[in-house]
Amino acid sequence: MVEAVPESIHFPSEEERILQLWVDKDCFQECLKQSKNRPRFTFYDGPPFATGLPHYGHILAGTIKDIVTRFAHQNGFHVERRFGWDCHGLPVEYEIDKSLNIRGPEDVAKMGIAEYNKQCRSIVMRYADEWETLVRRMGRWIDFRNDYKTLYPWFMETVWWVFKQLYDKGLVYRGVKVMPFSTACNTPLSNFEAHQNYKDVQDPSVIVTFPLLEDETVSFLAWTTTPWTLPSNLALCVSPDFIYVKVKGALHLSIIIVLGISVLITCVFLFNRFPGKTLKGKKYKPLFEYFIKCKESGAFSVVVDNYVRDDDGTGVVHQAPYFGADDYRVCMDYKIIQRDSAPICPVDSSGVFTAEVTHFAGQYVKDADKNIIKWLKENGRLVSSSSFKHSYPFCWRSDTPLIYKAVPSWFVRVEHMVEKLLDNNSKCYWVPEFVREKRFGNWLRDARDWAVSRNRYWGTPIPLWVSDDYEEVVCVGSTAELEELTGAKVSDLHRESIDHLTIPSRCGKGQLKRVSEVFDCWFESGSMPYAQVHYPFENRREFEDAFPADFIAEGIDQTRGWFYTLLVLSTALFGKPPFKNVIVNGLVLASDGQKMSKRKKNYPDPGLIVQNYGADALRLYLINSPVVRAENLRFKEEGVRDVLKDVFLPWYNAYRFLVQNVQRLQKEEAVKFLYNESTVSVSDNIMDKWIQSFTQSLIQFFRDEMGAYRLYTVVPKLVKFVDMLTNWYVRTNRRRLKGESGTEDCMRALETLFSVLFSMCRLMAPFTPYITELMYQNLRHLIDPASLEEKDTGSIHYLMLPHVRESLIDKRIESAVSQMQSVIELGRVIRDRKTLPVKYPLKEVVVIHQDPEALRDIQSLQKYILEELNVRQLTLSTDKDKYGIHLRAEPDHMVLGKRLKGAFKSVTAAIKELKSEELEIFQRTGSIVVDGHELHEDDLRLMYCFDQTSGTASQYEAHSDAQGHLVPSDEITVYYSSQPAGEYLDKVIQAHTDFILATTKAPLKPYPVAQNASVIVQEKTQLKGSDLELTIVRGSSVSRALLTTAACAYVNLRVTLKDKQQGGVVLLENPKGCDTLDVERLKTVCCSVFGLDGAPVTIFNGKTGEKDQLQTDLMSLSGKTLTVTSGSSPADASSSDSLLCPYVNLQLMNASPAECQTGDVATLLLMNPAGKNALHFPDLLRETAKVFGLRGRKLVLCLNEELTEGEEHTKTYFKKNKNLRERASVCVCVIERERQRVCV
């Protein structure tokens, strides 16, 4: 029997009760049993590492996967869902290296690989329990018992099989290639790994002389930001087409440089000009003589190539072929190095110089920079030394800078199959679609051969046994094959179990030994579709029948990770894509737009959010946001809370109201309520018909859109449906549901409400599995068992989706109710505007509409309008002139601005002058010519305005149904103007600003509206004797008031060393919220800025004493002045905390930051240290592009937000104000040139 529903509910507690119900009934396994004989829906779950705790990104992706797989089950498919674990690779090894203080291969050798791997194995499942607890608590149904782990021998065996297939196809080769190399992890990284973690860094910038052998008074100048590569220099490269000049400078020697860079030289006398190709073959004096023997093969001469650029440096590029990909290619072309020659690579796997480089042996390359610069200066080869800020790749695991280094590696050929990759990608259905063509497609077009080997220990060993000279190679593809070739029994495939095994040579080369490398863990995850089922050794038919997968989903960062490796391997193995459908989600950021950081604690703990609000609320909040469109989401706890308040509580109250009235009917009328869809009577009530029609239309839409994987269109409709049910159907039918219009009519209303709630539960079940189960467990007692198709109805999740009952769909009624709702909502707005509560009756409401049919629809629902608005009379009319109503038009700023560009301003003015009669014709025809431009329905918004000068002005108040088409997650800014200023309304707005902000959740700013603003809607009205004008624009505006000081956190530094006494600034973040420094990075940047040559430094916050030394919470010190010494306490720490260097703030106006940056506000220092390294206007433009990750994009700098002081004005300002030391800060607005017209 149906149970009474309590008035209040604590959703998290109810979810815990439902979770226990699922455990007791083993509901997930029961689902799988029930669907065993249905068609299969294949889903691949990308394996996470269990060495870290799950975060909101994991929760989001897991929720998307759970929704789609639940929907597939409800849609009649059998969906196997297995959890997987990534157990190998750098993430695990790096944790062990940190905990055991392992610094390189020598430390591992001392420990032994067996012990090292034992340590790794011990932590791979460190947080597995926490993962399983949170995943289950989030309501996700997935099999943890029948999981897969990449360390299982049967999984590793399939990885071997995959590799052998590639080897047999001739797609595997060993080569020396310059690759991104992690010195912290002692291993090369693939290109897509190197692109995952770029940061802006300060590197040394040096210009060095290379005297000609034929005339040592003439030198080439070469520029580099990696002085540590100079000991390995073998050539100089120039562009064949650039014009170079020979000049005499202040150094009293003749210098050859690029013409455009000649400004670097003071006191210049021009000798002659010539193209770079004339320099080819000229010999120069080496910097060092470590590799002088290479002179025999053409080293230490000038080569030419088109890769040389003229936007940085001198146009002469020093070549260290084993530390740069272009250097390697060019020197190979000129035969300075040979493919089989010994590499000139005097740096070991820890990034330390080897004994060949006698001056710097044993030094870490980045630390050696300062000593190399010192050597260059002492030997007269250094022209200039400074620092250079640029974007540089860091290791995604250790967060240390990568170097580029030639390493022998095993590669899989990819470049030859780029066209096939693109073709297979085109066969996949991507949501959103732009990811396929843009982000992923562009990555595929530039695909390079994949380095799959890693010089590590804890991973699947590469199954290649080779002779000492590598001429005989045996690739093993299975455990059985290895046992046959070695004669040994094999139970595990990790290095400690097989490295000692040898295979007799068939060519008389003795015993073949296994190569030392292991697979990149991305190769394992890319092999997951086959390895998780131990294909082809088991489940061969099952796999082949279900491949490619029907569905996968991960974050947008996986376009260069898992999505890529899956596609490469499936294309190489089977010539087809690995999946049919993929949903790509965006990133979940902190509420301020920064990356979520455990150190900053800038986001709420997911466990606490679930504990406080429940998993369903978190699921729905994440899914009903831009993140499911591959955009970023700023996570806000209040957003989760609002889901409870705005969706779940109204929905719960409607369910409670139904149960209350069913129980009342049984108690008072002795009428038993039992719902049977096939025998229920058809209601004649128009609101019953409307909600039934609306429900069936929703079911149809739900099936279509979910079938197309468009979650972002489905969820807003479901949320809107809750509003329609609770605020319209239940509200307008309360009396009927309570039985006030008779038992028969009450039964029809209750049957309708039950039908709708039951359908809604089944539709929402994939999205909110807990609350739907909660309601169903009670509602099921009101269902006639004979009416359900399913044999077992013990859970809502056993039931199939409701079928569309097309006979109940009546679009005419839906339209009529929609018209009624518009009338009621407009009436409520007018009442609010005039501060007339609904309890005060009004004489008349007048509805004016040009369509008589619409008026008839409104007439049919008259009683609801009169009741909701509390008016005595409804008057309908098509004669707007009678009531002083006229049409006016507003341009759609986004649409027209983009299309009309320069003509937009004049067309906008002409639109506002259009007469009502002209707009009526436009209403009928759908087009109008304005100022020579033809405009259509999408270009204009029409609004009815009340003419206050008409004779009826004192009797009526008007409003129209203009809409801005916003959703709750849209970022907006509201501008307002209240005239006369200082009057009642203006004072009310200012006095209640906090309340307005809390309600609109958007910045409120006084006029004027910025010219570059993307206007959504503009309206004028009269209220309380004032003229109120409101404009809503897209984007959350950053107040200029916030930018009167440096936008980014900073510290002043006063350096007090033996020979250094100077001041400067270090930005602790840039852009705001990005690339935040810790103490060690602060010290590194300090040494770079002040040229301290790596001297040991101590940074103090205060005057004396160890307790005053710098602590780790740097952000709390923003704006302070710190003292830098060699270790002793500062003698005098008194100083002003005002910024020591001039600066500009940058506000990115109409573009989004790229290259992993998220902030749109930044700061650039115009000098640093104080009085040195002045930044001129061309440098400002280039540095601006770098700081926002917009290299290659055409940017414009403007001095004001309205963009009236444009690029020339800005350039002139900087020329006039060269000495900016005593000037106030400047705020520069940054816009992308192609988008400039759109904003204006």
Image (cartoon, rainbow, N blue to C red):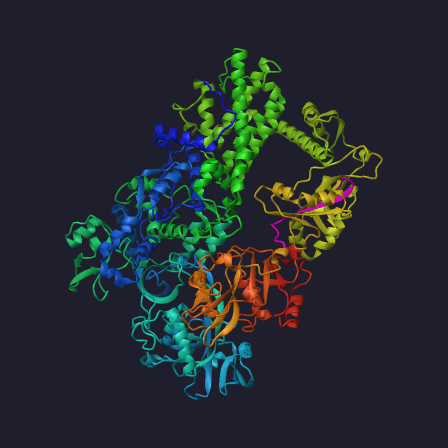
| Residue 644 placement, left or right of 788 | right
Query: Furthest residue to the right?
Result: 951
Query: Can you say whether 406 is above or below 34 in the image?
Result: below
Give the residue at x 49% y 63%.
1102
Q: Main secondary structure of the magenta part?
A: strand
Query: Furthest residue to the top?
Result: 670
Q: Which residues are magenta?
A: 1020-1039
Tell me if residue 734 can be seen. yes
Query: Can you say whether 934 is above or below 1165 in the image?
Result: above
For this rendering, which residue is in front, 87 or 583?
A: 87
Residue 1231, how many percent across, how many down? 61, 59
Residue 699, how many percent across, how many down? 52, 31
Q: Quadrant of residue 904?
A: bottom right
Residue 585, how many percent across, how many down? 47, 46
Find out whether residue 802 is within the magenta segment.
no
Q: Quadrant of residue 748?
A: top right
| Residue 129 placement, left or right of 967 | left
Q: Quadrant of residue 608?
A: top left
| Residue 832 placement, left or right of 1078 | right
Q: How many marks?
A: 0
Quarter holding the C terminus? bottom right
Find out whether residue 1029 is within the magenta segment.
yes
For this rendering, which residue is in front, 806 or 1067?
A: 1067
Tell me if residue 75 can be seen. no
Residue 206, how many percent across, how many down? 46, 75
Quarter holding the N terminus? top left
